[in-house]
Amino acid sequence: MSLYYLQKFLYVLNRDEGAQKKYQNDLEALLGDFDLTDEEADALRKGDIGLLYVLGVNGQILMHYAAFLGIEWFDYLDMMRKGIEEHGPVRAGVYTMTGEGESFTEEEKSR
Amino acid sequence: MSLVYAGVCSHAPGITGRADLCENTEKRDEFYAQLDKQRQDIEDSGAEALIVVAAEHFANFFMNNMPAFCIGIGAEYQGPIEDPEWLKISKTAVPGAPDLGTRITREVMQTVDVAYAEEWKFDHGIMVPLNFLTPNYDLPIIPVNINCQGPPLTPLHRAWEFGLALRRSCDAVPEKVALVGTGGVSHWPATPDSGKINEEWDRRFLGQLMRQDKEAVLGYSDQETYAQAGQGGYEIRTYIATAAAAGGLGELQFYTAELPIFAVGVTVGRFDIAA
Ligand SMILES: [Fe+2]
C-alpha cells in the first residue's frame, strides 16, 4: 500500500516548487507528510534511484526525480541497473527491465 | 469552422534533452526538419488554436484521481515541470484557450464523459512538441490527456470514440482548430532498456494507423502491447484518437529506429481531414 504514497511523494515533489523548497530545507518535514515505510523514507533521504526503481516507482516520476537531483542521463540508467544487481528485479509496476541490463544506444556503449 | 489540421509526433524528453548526446546528427536533423514542416503545415492551415492530445506522465493526473480523458480549459499553463537544464527547454507560460476549450468540452461531453481542468502543468509530453511546433508560444493551446500511464488504462476503442467526439466538437465551433496527437510507438522509456525499439511492431502499427484500419489498431491488447512494445507502447492511444478525429488517410512523413538515444521510434505524420 505504501508504494502509492512513495510515488505520491515524488509526484508532488516533481510538480510543486513549494515541495521542492521544502525538500531542500526540511526534508524530514516533507517526508512526514507521507505514509512511508522506513525503507522508503531512507531511499528518499539518500536519493537512492536504484532502490526506488526496484521498489516499483513509476519510471516517469523516477526519471523526473533523477533530473531534479541533477543526475546525468547515463549515470541514471546505471543506477537502475545497479539497483537490480543489489536488490533483485523490480517488485511492482510496469517499468521492469526486460533484458540483462545491456545498453541500447551506441552513445552509451562508446562512453 | 472546423478541424483544419491533424497530425502526430513523438514527445520523448531525449528529443530536446539529449540532442547534444546524439551521435547520428544527420538523422536527428532530418527529424527536426520534419517537425519544422509540421509547424509550417499547422501555420499554413490558419489554425487559431492547437489541441494537443497527449499522454502525460504523472505531472497532473495521478492515481488519487485519474480521469480516462481530460481537456484543459485554463487561460494559461506553465511548463516544463522538469528541470529545464535536463529537458533543455526553459520554463515558460503557454497561452490557453478557455472559451474555445470550454465549448469543445461541452460538445465532447455529449458522447464522452470527459474531465476538464483549469490548472495544468505541462511535462515533456506537451513541452517537447510545442518546442518545435509553436516555438514562440503564440498559438493558444488546448491540452488534452488520455490515461496511458496508470493502469487501468483508457481502452483503445474509447480513445477512438474520444477522437470522434473531438472532431465533432471542432466542427461545431467557428474557429479553425488544429490537432496534434503525441505519443509513442514501441519504447521502454525510463528503464535501463531506454533506447530499445521494436521497429517491426512500429511499422506495422503505423501502417495500420495511416490506412485508417480501425479494426487492426483497436485490436491490440494491453498485454500484447506491453510484451512487444513496452509500457511506452500504451501511448498509441493518442495516435488512435488523432486518426479517428481526422478520418482521412494518413501519411507517415518520418519514422526511424535509428535514434535510440531519443528512446522511442521517432515519428512524424499527418492525416487528411475527411469530410
Ligand atoms: Fe510519453
Image (cartoon, coloured by chain):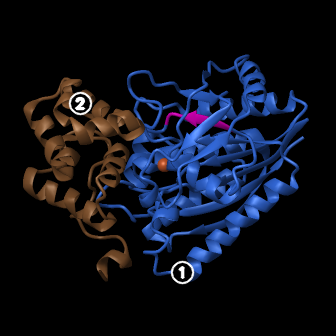
On whether ligand 1 comes within 8 Å of the CB at mark 1, the answer is no
What secondary structure do most residues of the magenta stretch adopt? Answer: strand
**Residue at label 1?**
B25
Q: Is residue B84 magenta?
A: no
Residue drawn 86% across the image and 29% down it:
B173
Rounded to the nearest whole Å, what is the CA distance between mark 2 and mark 1? 43 Å
Instruction: Tell me: residue B265, above or below residue A106.
Output: above
Dot 2, how many residues are within 10 Å of its Cα: few (below 14), some (14-19), or many (20+)? some
Image quarter hosting the N terminus of chain B: top right
Q: Residue at x 79, y 28 (%)?
A: B169
Q: Identify the disc placed on residue B190.
A: none
Q: Is residue A110 visible?
A: yes
Q: Is residue B135 above or below residue B151?
A: below
- Colour representing chain A: brown
Expressed as whole percent of the image width and height from the top left, the position of residue B123 reads 50, 45
Where does the image place residue B30, in percent across and percent down from the top left? 64, 75
Figure quadrant of residue B11: bottom right
Whether residue B143 appears in magenta in the rendering, the answer is yes
Quadrant, the C terminus of chain B? top right
Q: Amino acid at mark 1?
A: Thr
Chain under callout 1: B
Query: Which colour denotes chain B?
Result: blue
Chain of the residue that carries numbered disc 2 in the rendered image: A
What range is drawn magenta here?
A: B142-147
Asked which secondary structure carries label 2, the reply is helix
In this view, the residue in front, A95 or B121, is B121
Mark 2 residue type = Leu
Label annotation for residue A30: 2
Closest to the observer, A18 or B230: A18
Side of A83 where B120 appears, left or right: right
Q: SS of the residue at dot 1?
A: helix
Vertical position of residue B97 compared to residue A33: above or below? below
